[in-house]
Image (cartoon, rainbow, N blue to C red):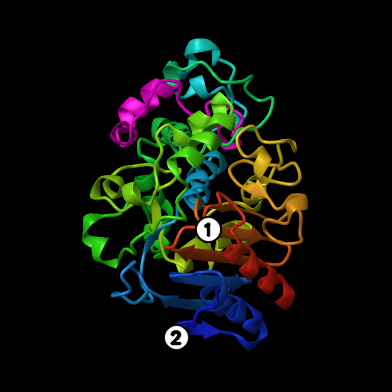
């Protein structure tokens, strides 16, 4: 159903007018409520647009500095923390996780490598025992349970999307090596010095800037039960233990917690800046965050396969690198199969394409039903590449 597009604010270089058209089209044709999109080219911002509403009641306009929870788009910045430590020689991706986190060796996991955590191949897509939202917000409890758990499948053999556990697994290694949780490490090493408006969790002082997330179209309880009945145990654990959505993400408890897989908050400008570090092979302006070799390593493919959690959602096999997903034959991040990025539940996205020199950040508050490749995001990605 077509609706009138709101006044879109910001700027867009004439060369990228197709991106502006797609962004406005998301409001008219694809049900957008409030959103922002930013594109960088060779480190320069060429698109920076925002519009719509920051709340379901349409009383708060989306502004230049509006923040929003970006769900799994957070996994890119979380992965960046691990890559910084590896670049400094403090973390070896080919070492057993237990080298840094001895308790992790329990239940047959002594040979699980750090690279298995980054590539969703650790066999720990979700917890076996019931895990509540409140328990997810308890860092120590969650990592203790993960350390004690037997893998769902042979680690390293194939990927199974670690929807919520990714951040605790990678994050605990970051903490064991650096002494800081990923949120504090990211702030100290990247976002603070570079002035990037992105945090893991949301400081209470920034709550007034946060957009309200709005549920995707709700399935009936019987439809939801039918969907869950079709899922393998490792997929059900990943996606529904605990089951979290807009209601949880709008709460102070979620915002105060450290959930590096899913509760990063930022602007589209911030997402584009963080993914631009990868797109520019480790550089940010005149500063270097990663060596070129370390920045390239994030897309070191670990083998394509039908993902054990997400497999049914994609026409082709997918391939994950060391923290981010390759565009591959699905074209999730454009026509360059070596471009890479990460989507967030409901629609958000961060994209990096070193060959084209571009990064993209897209954030929104009306969640769609997709874990990846939301039609609004794909319209923006297609428009971007049509302009290059």
Camera-nearest residue between 387 and 382: 382
Cα–Cα span, label 1 and label 2: 21 Å
Q: Quadrant of the C terminus?
A: bottom right
Magenta span of residues: 117-146
The residue at the far bottom in this view is 14
Residue 246: percent from the left, percent from the top? Answer: 37, 52
Camera-nearest residue between 324 and 246: 246
Q: Is residue 119 on the magenta stretch?
A: yes
Left or right of 300, for residue 148: left
**From this viewpoint, is residue 170 visible?**
no
Q: Is residue 361 on the magenta stretch?
A: no
- Give the residue drawn at x 41%, y 50%: 186
Q: Earlier in the sequence, mark 1 or mark 2?
A: 2
Q: Quadrant of residue 259?
A: top left
Q: Quadrant of residue 56?
A: bottom left
Q: Secondary structure at mark 1?
A: loop
Check the image and report above or below for 264 versus 116: below
Residue 276: percent from the left, percent from the top? Answer: 57, 62
- Give the residue drawn at x 52%, y 26%: 124
Residue 116: percent from the left, percent from the top? Answer: 60, 30
Residue 332: percent from the left, percent from the top? Answer: 68, 56
**From this viewpoint, is residue 148 visible?**
yes
Camera-nearest residue between 315 and 386: 315
**Which residue is disc 2 drawn over?**
7
Left or right of 278, for residue 175: left
**Which residue is disc 1 drawn over?**
347
């Amino acid at each position: 159903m077509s609706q009138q597009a709101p006044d879109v604010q910001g700027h867009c270089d004439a060369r990228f007018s197709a991106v502006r058209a797609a962004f406005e089209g998301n409001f008219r044709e694809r049900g957008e409520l409030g959103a922002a999109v930013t594109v960088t080219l060779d480190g320069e911002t060429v698109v920076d647009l925002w519009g719509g509403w920051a709340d379901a009641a349409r009383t708060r306009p989306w502004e230049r500095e509006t923040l929003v929870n970006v769900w799994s788009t957070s996994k890119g910045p979380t992965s960046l923390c691990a890559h910084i430590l590896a670049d400094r020689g403090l973390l070896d991706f080919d070492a057993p996780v237990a080298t840094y986190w001895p308790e992790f060796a329990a239940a047959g996991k002594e040979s699980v490598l750090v690279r298995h955590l980054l590539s969703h191949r650790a066999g720990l897509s979700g917890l076996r025992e019931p895990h509540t939202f409140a328990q997810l917000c308890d860092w120590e409890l969650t990592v203790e349970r993960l350390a004690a758990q037997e893998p769902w499948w042979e680690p390293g053999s194939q990927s199974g999307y670690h929807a919520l556990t990714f951040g605790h697994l990678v994050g605990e290694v970051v903490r064991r090596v650096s002494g800081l949780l990923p949120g504090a490490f990211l702030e100290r090493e990247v976002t603070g010095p570079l002035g990037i408006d992105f945090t893991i969790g949301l400081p209470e002082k920034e709550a007034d800037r946060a957009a309200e997330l709005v549920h995707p179209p709700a399935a009936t309880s019987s439809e939801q039960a039918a969907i869950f009945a079709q899922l393998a145990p490792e997929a059900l654990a990943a996606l529904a233990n605990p089951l979290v959505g807009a209601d949880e993400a709008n709460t102070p408890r979620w915002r105060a917690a450290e959930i590096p897989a899913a509760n990063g908050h930022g602007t589209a400008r911030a997402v584009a800046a963080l993914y631009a570090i990868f797109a520019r092979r480790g550089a940010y302006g005149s500063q270097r965050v990663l060596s070129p070799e370390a920045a390239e390593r994030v897309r070191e493919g670990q083998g394509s396969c039908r993902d054990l959690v997400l497999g049914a959602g994609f026409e082709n096999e997918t391939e994950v690198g060391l923290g981010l997903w390759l565009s591959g034959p699905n074209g999730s991040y454009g026509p360059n199969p070596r471009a890479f990025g990460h989507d967030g539940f409901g629609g958000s996205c961060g994209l990096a394409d070193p060959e084209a020199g571009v990064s993209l950040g897209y954030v929104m508050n009306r969640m769609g039903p997709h874990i990846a490749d939301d039609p609004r995001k794909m319209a923006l990605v297609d428009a971007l590449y049509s302009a290059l």
